[in-house]
Amino acid sequence: MNKKTFVFALMPIFLVVTLASFIVQKDDVVATKILGEVSKKYRSYKTIKAGFKVSMKSKQDQGNVTQSGTLYLKGKKFRIDMSGQEIYCDGKTLWTYLADANEVQITKYDPGKNEISPSSIFTIYQKGFIYKYTGEEMVKGKSVQKIELSPRDKAKPYFKVKLSVDKLGRNINDMTVFNKSGLESKYEITNFIPNVAITENTFKFDPKSKPGVVVIDLTK
């Protein structure tokens, strides 16, 4: 798996938290109840700071890539910091900074055109999926409940998403995305801090912080 593939796979999507009702099937009662409780909890947070680990593997080239990073969320705004890459979004504009090229690309933010990334792990289940509860198991000493999501839109590049929810804390432990191309991406939350103080500047790229940065503005 090359670096361009990895960077593209991490392009963020932030699905806005809404009060839309879950689409329920008879065999989805348990899953819907769990996700409803998770949604209620996350809507109560003003901000989120979370550490995460991304593990990506491809059936085509049998490559494996693992990286760690930090995610900041505040409403529609987010920031993702990873080794060699930083992504900023103030809800309208998206900045993607690549350290090895000392380059930042600026684009208009359109959630509908982006795919799954760490920034969507807490809200992805809220729209456009059929839910299926698949059981409970012990993971690292705690009980987690497994839910499988199938997108209603079959044109999506992924055909399945698996969520693990902490049964006691009602927090999302991890999310695994199964792409039609054979790429499998697992996003694991390693630490979670709600309602942390986050300034507005956190979500905007400051070129002064990267001397000599090449700016590619694609918004014009």
Image (cartoon, helix red, strand yellow):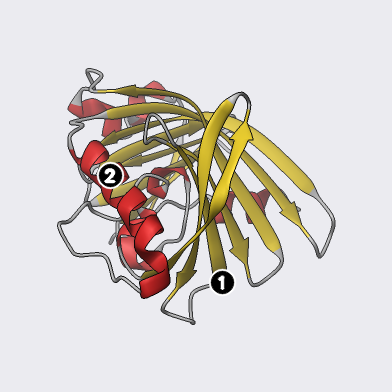
Compute the Cα span from label 1 to label 2. 25 Å
Label 1 secondary element? strand
Which residue is depicted at the point 23% across and 29% down? Answer: 47
Badge nearest the viewer, 1 or 2: 2
Residue placed most toward the observer, 159 or 100: 159
In the displayed orientation, state which residue is furthest to the bottom.
Answer: 154
Using the rendered view, name the quadrant where residue 23 is placed: bottom left
Q: Which mark is residue 37?
A: 2
Using the rendered view, name the quadrant where residue 89 is placed: top left
| 50 lies left or right of 141 | left
Residue 218 appears in the picture as rendered? no
Residue 51 appears in the picture as rendered? yes
| 188 lies left or right of 207 | right
Which residue is tagged 1?
Answer: 159
Image location (x, y in percent) of residue 112: 33, 67
Q: Is residue 162 above or below residue 23?
A: above
